[in-house]
Amino acid sequence: MRENVVIRTVSRLSIPFIQLFALYVIVHGASGAGGGFQGGVVFATSFILLLIAFGLPGVRSRFSGRSARIFAAAGIFIYAGIGLLCIFYTGNFLEYAAIESASGIPHLHALLIDLVEAGIGITVLAVMTMIIVVFADKGEIQRD
Amino acid sequence: MKKLALIAVIFIGIILFWAVGDMPAFGDPDAPANQHVARMYIDRTLPDIGIDNIVTAIIASYRGFDTLGEVVVIFTAGISVILLLRRGEER
Amino acid sequence: MIEDLFGLFLSRYNYWMAIILMLIGLYALIAKQNLVKKIIGLNIFQTAIFLFYISFADVTGGTAPIYTEEGTSALYVNPLPHALMLTAIVVGVSITAVALSLVVRIYQEYQVMDEDELLEEMRRP
């Protein structure tokens, strides 16, 4: 049982830093290397480490199957919602320049790209975690 | 069966090696793949959009519709895995 | 003639590497009997395609496609294949996830994971 203590302590120390790095990668998608897909996968890696160190109850109590499904749908909702918002400002679907020229706020194009990347990151994180937890569980989804 | 597969793979390999002679050299700045559309993306990202990362500008703004389809593909893969592996209802 | 062939080989070595990887992946996909080995062969094939595209986007002396202080006058590598291959990597991950879940269901139903034994089990009434 000694190696269990080592794995659990090291995981407890490093999981918050992995999640912080994942948020860094998502937010810096516009001005450096990074983006939505990459940051979402790094965030899901922290949940996989939680699964390896603490077993299935450790992940289920913190990120249940129901929240994963809601997050997966919410990311697509954000992306398509911003695209529909561009239609209200007399542009085409997903034409961010129309909102920027109609409302006059500077740098709005870059801000909308950041929001869209955050939506992509949320969906990728939820789906990757959902796949790994369903495989580890041998297929039971719980009625929660 | 395995010999047949090996013969087919080697035949495809010979055809592909013969086609390498027409490809541009590694790192050629005058290759036709680097000219028209890529040149336009590099020149017009900073005035049009104003962000520094050209690859993010391509996937999120110039070709944003493809990225929307991409996110739907990931979502569909997650739903398929849940549908294939669930066992909660047979009890 | 011999110098021509030599120049052909030395200046285009990236395509040769991608083609060799692609052939290894194709052989594993066709000729192996185990289902998980076939899925691994599919992944090797996809990786060879990514390497092929990214390698012909390179420009000698170019830097990463993120703007430096000089702006548009500096030499950047071609950014378009990088964007296309991001999409392709995501598709590869999705295919592997669904294929592995199909293999798990096949094993639960028939208790075999070989292609020939599986066909025998399916023909038995």
Image: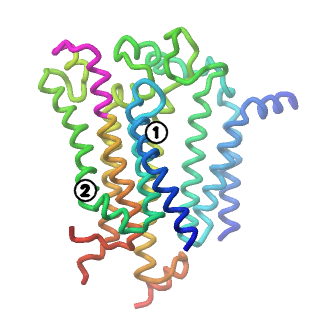
Magenta residue check for A144: no
Residue located beneath label 2 in the image: A67
Residue under the point 65% across and 63% down: B5
Q: Is residue A102 magenta?
A: yes
Magenta stretch, main secondary structure, is helix
Which residue appears farthest toward the bottom when viewing the image?
Answer: C125
Residue placed most toward the observer, C32 or A77: A77
Quarter of the image holding residue B20? top right
Measure the C-alpha gap from mark 1 to mark 2. 27 Å
Q: Is residue B13 visible?
A: yes
Q: Position of residue A132 (x, y in %)?
A: 41, 61
Q: Is residue A11 above or below residue A118?
A: below
Residue A123 percent across, percent down from the top left: 31, 47
Closer mark to the observer between disc 1 and disc 2: 2
Q: Read off the residue under disc 1.
A: C86
- Magenta-highlighted residues: A101-116
In this image, A8 relative to C48: left or right? Answer: left
Q: Secondary structure at mark 2?
A: helix
Please tell me whether residue C53 is drawn above or below residue A16 in the rendered image: above
Q: Quadrant of residue C57?
A: top right
Q: How many marks?
A: 2
Amino acid found under the numbered disc labelled 2 = Ser
Q: Residue B37 at x, y = what percent? A: 46, 20
| Residue in view at x 64 percent, y 59 percent | C27
Chain under disc 2: A
Chain of the residue under label 1:
C
Place of residue C2 in the rendered image (x, y in percent of width and height, measured from the top left): 87, 31
